[in-house]
Image (cartoon, grey):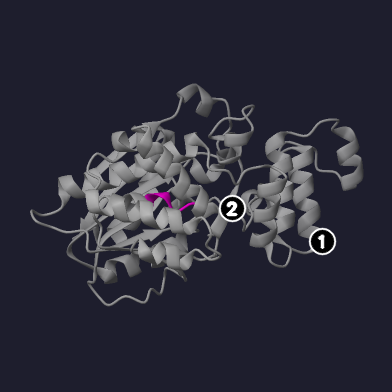
Amino acid sequence: MNKTRLKLFIWLLVAGDNTQQRRVSSFHLFQQKKYMSLWKLKAIIQKTISLLPYNHKVNYLFQKYITKGVRLTDELLDDKLLHCSHHLKAFEQFATPNAKLNEVVELGTGWFPIVPIGLYLSGAKHITTVDLTPLLRIDNVQTTLKKIVEYYENGKLQTFLPNIKKERWTTFCEIAKQAENAQHCEAILEALHITPLVADARNLPFKDASIDFITSNNTFEHIYEPILLDILREFRRISHAETLMSHFIDMSDHFAHLDKKITIFNFLKFSEKQWQIIDNTIQPQNRLRINEHRLLLEKTGFELLDEQNRIGNLSDLQSINLADCFANFSTDDILVTHSLQICKSK
């Protein structure tokens, strides 16, 4: 980003989106605002980090030591285990009789390999978890293993994963014990039939029609539409006639997760040009709505079998002025904030 774009970015966030068209310095803009909204502050920080060398490493350190965002809380663990539970139920419900979870691909590894571990414990033969950035760290993997053991011992894990294989659990406990003194996470995960793959998901190292199940968890919303289209085409290539996909998509404004003073529709008031300035490469948000996700599946040769949607509050949507780029969308489509889409090859 050049200096002009950076100034535009600060203008847009600090002065607001309805400011008079006049030239002032960013310093004076900051003086005019005694307090800055949390979401705007986060946007500025993420935008700045995205301009730095090794930006993902910087972002990890910032979130771990400053914001304390890299923590495996019970809330996060519950959420990921619930996702895993829904994926398994989708496979059980929609897969053909006697279908097996032989080869599974997860898009979006993240910091904690919770869903792949849940799939392993439930009998999946092999899971490849794909991410463009190497986010896994041995300390986070150790924390994940320890927390899952705790959840099993207090009976909570079984409420999410009722079909844990006995022999898999025995092996898991042995691996979790060995992991306490491990220096690297790759061997630990391989022992659990999990392969972390750092790669561009548009070009995966799998043979045609070789994958049985493809999942993602709040990942699609961070991928820009042209790239997501190519990823889905690649998923179609590695899918056979009975392959299932199960994807959780969070279409809410992620800045609202931090700043409760804005609604989960807040980012829909910005034009495409404004959003390009605000958005960042650390945690990008494509702002695609549910009808656009359906269209992407159709374009890439997938049939939507089931869709479970969460709807936002109409009053929250009505509290903002929608940008022109969303003017032709139906209210029903815009109100969908979260979705689980289950599909298979046509």
Point out residue 301 in the picture as x, y percentages from the top left corner.
25, 62
The residue at the far left in this view is 97
On the image, the x and y values in percent for residue 132 come to 51, 66
User: Which label belongs to residue 3?
Assistant: 1
Asked if the magenta segment contains residue 114, the reply would be yes
182 or 67, which is in the foreground?
A: 182
- Disc assigned to residue 283: 2
| Disc on the earlier residue, 2 or 1 | 1
Quadrant where the image shows the N terminus: bottom right
Q: Quadrant of residue 96?
A: bottom left
Return the x and y of residue 88 as percentages of the image width and height.
25, 47
Which secondary structure, mark 1?
helix
Q: Can residue 33 be seen in this view?
A: yes
CA separation, marks 2 and 1? 21 Å
Q: Locate residue 336 relative to residue 20 in the image: left or right.
A: left
SS label for mark 2: loop
Magenta residues?
112-116
Instruction: Considering the whole magenta stretch, tell me its main secondary structure.
Output: helix
**View extreme (top): residue:** 315
Amino acid type for the residue under numbered disc 1: Lys
The amino acid at mark 2 is Gln
In front of the other: 82 or 202: 82
Categorize mark 2 by other alpha carbons within 10 Å: few (<14), some (14-19), many (20+): some
Instruction: Place residue 303 in its image quadrant.
Output: bottom left
